[in-house]
């Protein structure tokens, strides 16, 4: 009596594993060849599946790339990052470090470059990536800053602007050289140095006098 439900669970697990296998193969191809250079045949070979199997899961490479972006957004979310109970300096350093570790991780540059390259042709994809990665991080910091302003620890007129200022300050000397392949991904120590500088600059601008 229990055989059918167990088979259904196994089937769903197998289906999920096959989809992950295809996405991983597609990600490698997109990283190596870019969006325009990638073909469904090349993706099928990299994923170790037939083209027929590939089309069962994805109608075309647009759908495949959208699924990769969706997975990227999900994998690098910030739901587990706890800054609410921390003082401003500690919260800024933790969030800035975590954000830059995501933004400049070795395998992440190709994804960002590919999204940037095709955003003009596929604006919905660009908006999806921006909304789920940078904007989510900026929003989390802005919400935290509002609580700090309400508590009297910071004086900020526009928390959304201040959050963007801080996050972009954390990128200084790191992100652009990385994304344009001038330098390799920065180390955690290099990131910490820049984030600490951004934090001190931010607090000097927005902390009330005498605090």
Image: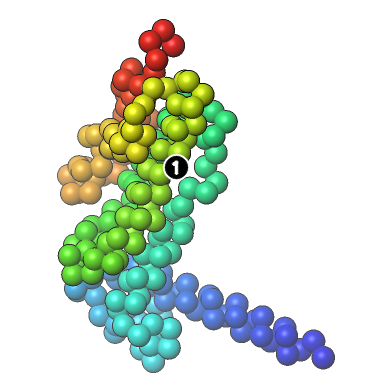
Residue at horizontal 43%, vertical 88%? Answer: 56
Answer yes or no: is residue 35 visible: yes
Instruction: State the residue lying farthest toward the top.
Output: 210
Q: Residue 118 at x, y = what percent?
A: 20, 66
* 137 relative to 111 in the view: left or right: right
Q: From what the image shows, is residue 116 above or below residue 142? A: below
Answer above or below: position of 97 versus 73.
above
| 1 vs 200, nearest the viewer | 200
| Residue beneath the point at 65% across and 81% down | 10
Determine whether 76 is above or below 16 in the image: above
- Tell me the quarter of the picture where residue 186 sits: top left
In the figure, 184 relative to 25: above or below? above
Number of other residues with Cα within 10 Å of mark 1, as a class: few under 14, some 14 to 19, many 20 or more:
some
Q: Position of residue 57 (x, y in %)?
A: 43, 83
Determine the residue positioned at 30% across, 60% down: 127
| Residue 135 picture location, percent across and down | 36, 49
Quadrant, the N terminus? bottom right
Q: Nearer the viewer, residue 44 or 142?
A: 142
Res. 110 in view: no
Which residue is most to the right? 1
Which quadrant would the C terminus be assigned to in this image? top left
């Amino acid at each position: 009596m229990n055989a059918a439900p167990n088979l259904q669970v196994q089937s769903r697990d197998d289906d999920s594993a096959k989809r992950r296998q295809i996405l991983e193969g597609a990600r490698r191809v997109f990283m190596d060849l870019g969006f325009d250079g990638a073909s469904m045949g090349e993706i099928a070979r990299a994923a170790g599946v037939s083209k027929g199997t590939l089309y069962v899961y994805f109608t075309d490479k647009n759908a495949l790339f959208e699924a990769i972006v969706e997975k990227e957004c999900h994998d690098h979310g910030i739901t587990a990052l706890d800054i609410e109970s921390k003082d401003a300096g500690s919260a800024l350093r933790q969030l800035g470090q975590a954000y830059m570790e995501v933004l400049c991780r070795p395998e992440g540059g190709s994804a960002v470059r590919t999204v940037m390259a095709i955003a003009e042709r596929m604006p919905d994809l660009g908006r999806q990536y921006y909304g789920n990665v940078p904007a989510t991080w900026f929003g989390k910091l802005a919400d935290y800053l509002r609580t700090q302003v309400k508590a009297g620890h910071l004086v900020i007129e526009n928390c959304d602007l201040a959050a963007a200022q801080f996050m972009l300050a954390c990128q200084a000397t790191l992100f652009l050289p990385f994304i344009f392949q001038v330098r390799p991904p920065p180390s955690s120590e290099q990131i910490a140095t820049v984030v600490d500088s951004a934090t001190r600059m931010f607090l000097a601008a927005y902390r009330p006098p005498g605090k």
